[in-house]
Structure formats: C-alpha cells, structure tokens
Amino acid sequence: MAKALYTYAATALVTAALASAGAWRVQEWRWQANTAAATKERQAAEDEARELRESDARQQRQLAARKVGEHAAALAGLNNQLGDARARIAKLSDRRCLDAGTVGMLNAIGKPASPNLGLRAPAGRAAGSAAAAAGPADDAGGYASERDAAEHIATCRARYAELSGQLNQILDIEDARDARRAAP
C-alpha cells in the first residue's frame, strides 16, 4: 500500500508540475499579448502626435510664407508711395523752414547725452566711430528747407508703416500658433 501511495504522490507531483508549467505558459502568453497591445497603442499615440506636430509645423510654414508674401506686397506699395512722395518733394522750394537751433534739437533726439552710454556702432562702422556718429554735426548748412523736412517726414512715415506691418505679421503668426496649441 505504501508503494501505491508513492505512485499517487508522484503522479500528483508530476500533475502539479505540469499544471504549474501550463499556468506559467498561459500567463506568459497573456502578458505578451497585453504588452504587445500596449506597445501598439503607445506606438499609435506617438505616430498621431508626430503627425500632429508635422501638420502644425507645415501649417506654420504655410502661414509664414503667406504673411511674407503679403508683407512683400505691402512693402512694394510703400516703396511706390515713397517714390511718388519723393518726386513731389523734389518740386518743393529750398526755402528755409527750420532754423539751425531747431534742426540741432531734432537731430539730438534719441542720441545719448554722453557717448559712453552704450551707443552701438551702425553696421559697417568701427565701434570707435559710434561716438563720432552721435555728434551734433548732423545738420549741413545749419537750417532745414521745406524739401528736407518733407523728405524726413516721408521717410519716417514709410519706415513706421513698414515696421508696424512686420510687427502685425509676427503677431498674427504667434496668435495662430497659440490658437493651435490651445486647441485639443
């Protein structure tokens, strides 16, 4: 009888070992299936995020290209207007309209009182020539004619329009970028 007990015990142990190995293998298959599904989901999410980033970058490039074209057209219009204004300005008289003191005061606007206040040299000039550029010797002849005043006003208006146009284009691009970021 003891021999039969050992046979049953051995059979039970073998059966338990086979059941454990089978359960282990089934759990491994389930884990691999779950891991593969999670990997596919993660990969799909990454692919979708990459496509959204690429689409966003493509839209930003298209918007920027369109804004550049609009700005170039606006700039061409400004240059035409400035050319027309300069043609009309050339017909003005050379009569004095601003005396030397007023011209000197206007030329000093925007210049530092001391050359040591960090005035940068314009492109093409050496750094030491920045102080010389800030000097009061900007008025040639000591007075400004109607033609000079009109020329400066026209140039200032054109540059203002150009700069405000550039700034508006940049703000439009940033607004579009922020709107895309805020969208879910």
Image: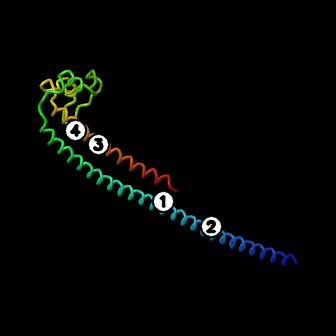
Residue 164 image offset from top left, x and y in percent: 32, 42
Q: CA distance from mark 1 to mark 4?
A: 48 Å
Q: Secondary structure at mark 1?
A: helix
**Residue 14 placement (x, y as % from top left):** 74, 74
Q: 22 or 26, which is in the foreground?
A: 26
What residue is shown at x 30% (from left), y 24% (from top)? 117
Q: How many angstroms separate mark 3 from mark 1 (CA)?
A: 40 Å
Question: How far apart are the alpha carbons under marks 4 and 2?
Answer: 74 Å
* Secondary structure type for disc 4: helix
Secondary-structure class at tag 3:
helix
Q: Amino acid at mark 2?
A: Trp
Label 4 sits on residue = 155
Q: Residues within 10 Å of mark 1 (few under 14, many from 20)?
A: few
Q: Nearer the viewer, mark 2 or mark 3?
A: 3
**Nearest to the observer: residue 32 or residue 137:** 137
Q: In the rendered image, which residue does mark 3 sit on?
A: 161
Where on the picture, by quarter, is residue 103? Answer: top left
Q: Amino acid at mark 3?
A: Ala
Label 3 near label 2: C-beta < 8 Å?
no
Which residue is labeled 2 in the image?
31
Lateral position of residue 29 relative to residue 87, left or right: right
Residue 138 to residue 67: above or below: above
Give the mark nearer the N terminus: 3 vs 1: 1
Name the amino acid, label 4: Thr
Label 2 secondary element: helix
Q: Crowdedness of circle 4 by 10 Å Cα count: few (<14), some, many (20+)? A: some
Whether residue 21 is situated above or below residue 134 in the rendered picture: below
Badge 1 amino acid: Ala
Considering only vertical position in the picture, is 134 above or below 171? above
Q: Which residue is mark 1?
A: 49
Query: What residue is at 48 percent from the left and 59 percent from the top?
Result: 49
